[in-house]
Image: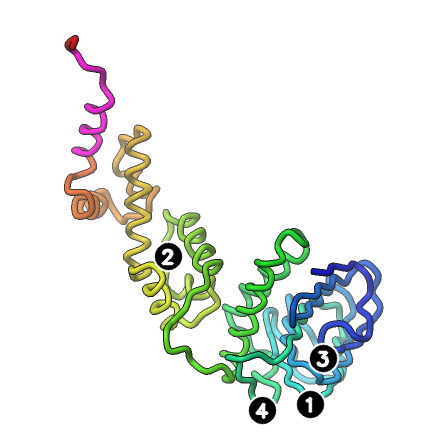
């Protein structure tokens, strides 16, 4: 992967000529993918339409030539054969991902979706691409390749160009991100819509793909993680079960007790007594 903090040359991502902005543009070249991130600054790009390209806006922007403003998180999928000039009337932070056409990605006939479209999956993926690009560099090459591939796939799905796969598939890095998100928010309410957004997938597709990858529904997996955390805290000496229920995302002491009993065959109190007995030294010499 080649990273640069210099202005984008005229043959950079998507063969798009951009304003020369010293120190504000980061470029990355991967196999069949070209990435250009521009920090908050005046934006102008001549897109010649030779390669498809995803353009993402990290903040709201007003087109220089008038028209409705684009909201923060808006994106477009530009298709070959449609050269255009992209210019903002005010500073904007952008991510451009150009790519060679590939098998499994069916591009729409015209650039789409409509200007101003916001998708939670594209939003989450674009932010992760930016983070990896700006903070991890060459060490994250493989991750960045998979990440941009997922971003391209999701953008094409939203644009209506990607065919549905016969078997739902959740990439390993996406599964890891979902699992980490769940573990970091166990005390809170976690919804399937929220997890689907983290994975960059629709709710229905994510549910099927998650079950195919883990053998459990998202709800079952979240419950198992909460129970595992509760058991670990009991092992560590937790004794206030009402507080433990709150810390692990159960609605009440009774809810925790019921779920724990179904999973482990005993109530939390009985489990705690059993663990305490196993940890105590023998009272009689052998």
Residue in the image at 29% along x and 59% along y: 216
Foreground: disc 1 or disc 3: 1
Question: How far is disc 1 from disc 4 in space, using C-alphas?
Answer: 10 Å
Is 17 included in the stretch rendered in magenta?
Answer: no
Mark sitting on residue 81: 1
Mark sitting on residue 63: 3
Please indicate whether residue 280 sits to the left or right of residue 35 in the image.
left
Please indicate whether residue 253 sits to the left or right of residue 203 in the image.
left
* Residue, disc 2: 190
Which sits earlier in the primary sequence, circle 1 or circle 2? 1
Residue at disc 3, secondary structure: loop
Residues at discs 3 and 4 in contact (Cβ within 8 Å): no
Q: Is residue 134 visible?
A: yes
* Residue, disc 4: 109
Residues at discs 3 and 2 in contact (Cβ within 8 Å): no
Q: Is residue 59 visible?
A: no
Residue in the image at 56% along x and 63% along y: 147
In the image, which residues are magenta?
Answer: 269-283
Identify which residue, 280 or 244, lies in the foreground: 280
Residue at disc 4, secondary structure: loop
Which sits earlier in the primary sequence, circle 1 or circle 4? 1
Question: How far is disc 1 from disc 2 in space, using C-alphas?
Answer: 43 Å
Q: For residue 115, which quarter of the picture?
A: bottom right
Which sits earlier in the primary sequence, circle 1 or circle 3? 3
Which sits earlier in the primary sequence, circle 3 or circle 2? 3
Quarter of the image where the N terminus is located: bottom right
Q: Is residue 273 above or below residue 47?
A: above
Is 277 included in the stretch rendered in magenta?
Answer: yes
Q: For residue 268, which quarter of the picture?
A: top left
């Amino acid at each position: 992967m080649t990273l640069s903090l210099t202005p984008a040359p005229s043959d950079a991502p998507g063969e798009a000529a951009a304003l020369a902005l010293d120190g504000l543009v980061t470029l990355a070249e991967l196999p069949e993918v070209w990435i250009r991130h521009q920090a908050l600054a005046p934006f102008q790009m001549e897109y010649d339409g030779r390669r498809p390209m995803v353009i993402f806006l990290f903040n709201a922007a007003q087109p220089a030539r008038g028209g409705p403003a684009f909201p923060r998180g808006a994106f477009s999928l530009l298709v070959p054969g449609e050269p255009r000039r992209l210019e903002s009337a005010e500073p904007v932070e952008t991510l451009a991902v150009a790519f060679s056409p590939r098998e499994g990605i069916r591009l729409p006939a015209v650039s789409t979706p409509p200007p101003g479209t916001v998708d939670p999956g594209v939003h989450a993926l674009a932010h992760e691409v930016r983070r990896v690009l700006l903070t991890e560099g060459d060490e994250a090459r493989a991750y960045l390749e998979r990440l941009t591939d997922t971003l391209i796939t999701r953008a094409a799905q939203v644009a209506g160009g990607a065919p549905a796969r016969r078997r739902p598939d959740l990439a390993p890095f996406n599964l890891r991100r979902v699992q980490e998100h769940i573990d970091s928010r166990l005390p809170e309410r976690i919804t399937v819509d929220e997890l689907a957004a983290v994975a960059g997938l629709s709710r229905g597709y994510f549910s099927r793909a998650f079950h195919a990858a883990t053998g459990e529904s998202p709800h079952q997996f979240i419950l198992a993680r909460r129970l595992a955390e509760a058991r670990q805290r009991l092992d560590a000496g937790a004794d206030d079960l009402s507080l433990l229920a709150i810390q692990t995302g159960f609605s009440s002491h009774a809810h925790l007790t019921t779920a724990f009993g179904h999973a482990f065959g005993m109530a939390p109190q009985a489990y705690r007594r059993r663990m305490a007995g196993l940890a105590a030294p023998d009272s009689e010499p052998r």
